[in-house]
Image (cartoon, grey):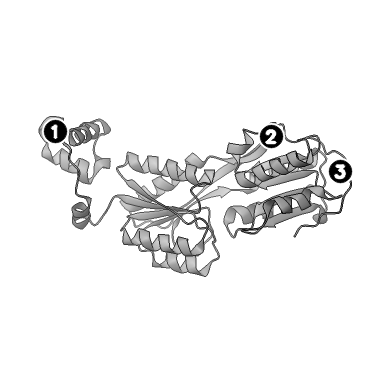
Amino acid sequence: MARQAGVSTVTVSRVCNEPDKVVPATRARVEAAMRSLGYIPNLAARAMRTQATRTIGILIPSLTVYPNAAVAQAAADRLAERGYAMLLASSDQQVQRECAALDLLRIRQVDGIILYVSDQTDPQIRAGLRRVDVPVVLLDRDLPLTADRVCTDHAAAMIAMVARLALLGHRRIALVQQTQAIRPTLERRRHFLAAGLAAGLEPACLLPVGLAPGQDMAAELGRLLDGANRPSAVIAEGSRLLLALLRACRERGLVVPEDLSLAALDAEDVAMAASPEVSSVVRDFGAIGRAAADMMLARLADPAPSPLSVELPSRFVDRASLAPPARVRGGPPFSPA
């Protein structure tokens, strides 16, 4: 291999064991020589020798949710640049599966774990995290754990969205979310209520609607939209809820934004495809994934420093789905569950 790549045997060894310390062009030549000769490094033997597998575990709540997938992809790309592989696990937002995935990643002897937990209050998840004996990077969760963190500032964008709706004249606004004990959901609800009060809205006209797992989404949205006191604006968190809300509007003949103003959180894949495009709070999920990977690589290179925390921005993007409120038609009043 060294002869074919035109390098020394020491360089070949470094490409196999410490690829991030080799100039990219040289590493590419050696890797090409390996492929042409059919050589596959013995990772098990290398792990026994170096006590490192050059594998990072990434645990997310769902593979089908766009933000989760985007963060994982960006992290995997950044790790690959440094010669690390990704071992991806999904809990499907089930606590038992999440705990089992944490144990599996430990058994596979990953060098570190980057993770979103599906419930930051669950005692089983907290106990599982306490058993982890490798570096951890937490993604936007509040947990009593000594670990590096990558979080998002949810306040500024949420305040800007509510202020925009209030400026347009909306006095009855709903925020529809999945009921989840995770930092983004809790922070957004808190700032939604605070921003509404700061804009002079009555507390009874700020409607946080939480949908529990398995709850009939269409039925709950129907209750929200069919009442005499229907909100003049609805904010949906996540692509699934935004899709369901758009479908509910279509079924009722409600035109956006003439009959109802719509806004979204973390749903750019749907918001940009809707007509009109939906005003949204957006985050750079690629930046989140890269920041998590960089933090993990830094921790592996130097385990000594105290835990670090970075907070990345979110921003409000105003589009054509918001307008001054129309008069709400008759029907039974809505009250949030």
Of labels 3 and 1, earlier in sequence is: 1
Q: Residues within 10 Å of mark 1 (few under 14, many from 20)?
A: some
| SS under mark 3 | loop
Going by the numbered disc 3, the residue's amino acid type is: Val
**Where residue 7 is drawn, which disc sits there?**
1
Image position, residue 52 (x, y; %)? 26, 54
Figure quadrant of residue 283: top right
Q: CA distance from mark 3 to mark 1?
A: 75 Å
In this rendering, would 285 be left or right of 195?
left
Figure quadrant of residue 110: bottom left
Q: Residue at x 48, y 48 (%)?
A: 63
Q: Residue at x 35, y 63 (%)?
A: 133
**Where residue 97 is drawn, which disc sits there?**
none
Q: Residues within 10 Å of mark 2 (few under 14, many from 20)?
A: some
Residue carrying label 3: 328
Q: Is residue 43 visible?
A: yes
Image position, residue 141 (x, y; %)? 53, 56
